[in-house]
């Protein structure tokens, strides 16, 4: 029996709804497999601006630094859109503080699920890719300036920053279908030229067994929806990865289906769905919990080293989604909490059958 300390950052909008689903799944896994998860809930985002006048209070940072893993719902909302202090700064701060430079965003479209895609079955069926998004550099963390008439955002990348995230992508490819597509805008942007040169050199020196191709981000957006099955691992800088992963979420049918793991040099990670706080559906129990539950499965796998438990959660998610008991965003009528409960029930049921 193992014991783990999990910090939960529910945040804003649908954040608390999906985070609750994540906690429910972990409690069920704990019961079924005999582990104890200690949950500590902390504030981040808009709610933390309201209470602490700080989107990432020190107390939250201390808890995250001490935890075995962190689960995040979502941050942001119209209430804070015009303020000087923004909820999103809290999310950037936790990523930076924990040194989480690689954001893994997997996406697949199983044969049984192609009907949920807005794209034709023959285009999406079998698509299975992993976006590795650089998460602590680039435009998100460069110097910003503003006068009444002019604004600037500095985009900085160093060789070391590109190398470490490219390594994550190459290592992941070796465990998948051995192909990496590096995405940049090297025909225009200097940081992209450094990005491409660094990836080419690292590939030559250490990863020549992995197939490597380069794509410009604009045509990549097109290829992702016209021939998604031709990609395996996609590695790209912070901003391009943000945009391409929302685009990729259209393939299986909803942004509510995609989870992510944000990882650094240690085993600690932040686990977050790729979607936002969805103010349009917040408080209505309509949010799809699947993206968050997939993130929890990654937490079990990558930070807690509980492979069997991660497999059990992934299998329960797939079984419930395949059964058609799903939320409105993918054509169902079930509430988010009912889907979350069904997935927990499925974990228990499968464990009982196996026993
Ligand atoms: P969003 O991802 O919140 O919502 C986009 C659309 O997808 C909406 O129609 C929403 O209802 C739907 N959607 C999102 N998640 C869903 C789910 N789990 N189930 C069903 N439908 C879902 O993006 P947005 O509207 O551009 O942003 C809203 C706020 O969220 C902004 O303040 C933004 O900054 C913030 N945001 C936060 C994160 C994060 O915390 N990781 C990520 C993206 C956006
Ligand atoms: C995401 C979000 C965040 C990002 C925002 C809310 C800071 O869009 O996690 O994809 O751009 O990284
Ligand atoms: Mn995003």
Image: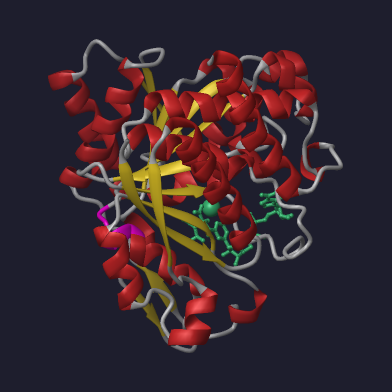
Write the residue at 54% across / 33% down. 219
Q: Residue furthest left?
A: 205
Nearest to the observer: residue 271 or residue 34: 34
Q: Taking 180 as reference, is 231 left or right?
A: right
Write the residue at 79% across / 61% down. 284
Q: Taking 205 as reference, is 29 left or right?
A: right
Nearest to the observer: residue 239 or residue 52: 52
Q: In the image, residue 287 lies at what x, y percent? A: 71, 52
Magenta residues? 95-99
Magenta highlight on residue 96:
yes
Considering the whole magenta stretch, tell me its main secondary structure: helix
> Which image quadrant: the N terminus?
top left
Write the residue at 25% across / 52% down. 157
Magenta highlight on residue 81:
no
Q: In the image, residue 306 lies at what x, y percent? A: 36, 30
Residue 217 visible? The answer is: no
Q: Up-down: is 83 above or below 121? A: below
Write the residue at 51% across / 45% down. 27
Q: In the image, residue 289 lies at what x, y percent? A: 64, 45
């Amino acid at each position: 029996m193992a014991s783990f300390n999990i910090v939960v950052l529910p945040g804003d909008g649908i954040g608390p709804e999906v985070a609750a689903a994540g906690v429910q799944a972990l409690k069920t896994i704990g019961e079924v497999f005999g582990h104890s998860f200690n949950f500590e809930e902390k504030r981040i985002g808009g709610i933390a601006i309201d209470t602490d006048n700080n989107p990432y209070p020190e107390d939250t940072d201390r808890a995250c630094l001490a935890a075995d893993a962190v689960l995040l719902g979502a941050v942001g909302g119209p209430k804070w859109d015009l303020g000087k202090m923004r909820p999103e700064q809290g999310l950037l701060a936790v990523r930076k503080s924990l040194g989480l430079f690689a954001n893994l965003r997997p996406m697949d479209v199983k044969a049984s699920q192609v009907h949920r895609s807005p794209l034709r079955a023959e285009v999406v069926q079998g698509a299975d890719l992993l976006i590795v998004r650089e998460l602590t550099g680039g435009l998100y963390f460069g110097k910003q300036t503003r006068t009444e008439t002019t604004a600037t955002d500095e985009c900085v990348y160093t060789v070391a920053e590109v190398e470490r995230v490219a390594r994550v992508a190459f290592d992941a490819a070796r465990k998948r279908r051995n192909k990496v597509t590096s995405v940049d805008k090297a025909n225009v942007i200097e940081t992209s030229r450094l990005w491409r040169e660094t990836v080419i050199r690292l590939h030559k020196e250490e990863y020549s067994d992995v197939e490597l191709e380069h794509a410009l981000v604009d045509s990549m957006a097109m290829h992702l929806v016209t021939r998604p099955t031709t990609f395996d691992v996609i590695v790209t800088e912070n901003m391009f990865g943000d945009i391409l992963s929302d685009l990729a979420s259209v393939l299986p049918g909803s942004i509510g289906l995609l989870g992510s793991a944000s990882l650094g040099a240690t085993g600690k990670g932040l686990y977050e769905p790729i979607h936002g706080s969805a103010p349009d559906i917040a408080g209505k129990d309509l949010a799809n919990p699947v993206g968050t539950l997939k993130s929890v499965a990654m937490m079990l796998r990558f930070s807690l080293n509980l492979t069997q438990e991660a497999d059990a959660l992934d299998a329960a998610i797939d079984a419930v989604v395949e059964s058609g008991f799903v939320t409105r965003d993918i054509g169902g009528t079930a509430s988010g909490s009912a889907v979350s409960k069904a997935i927990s029930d499925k974990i228990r049921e499968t464990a009982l059958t196996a026993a």
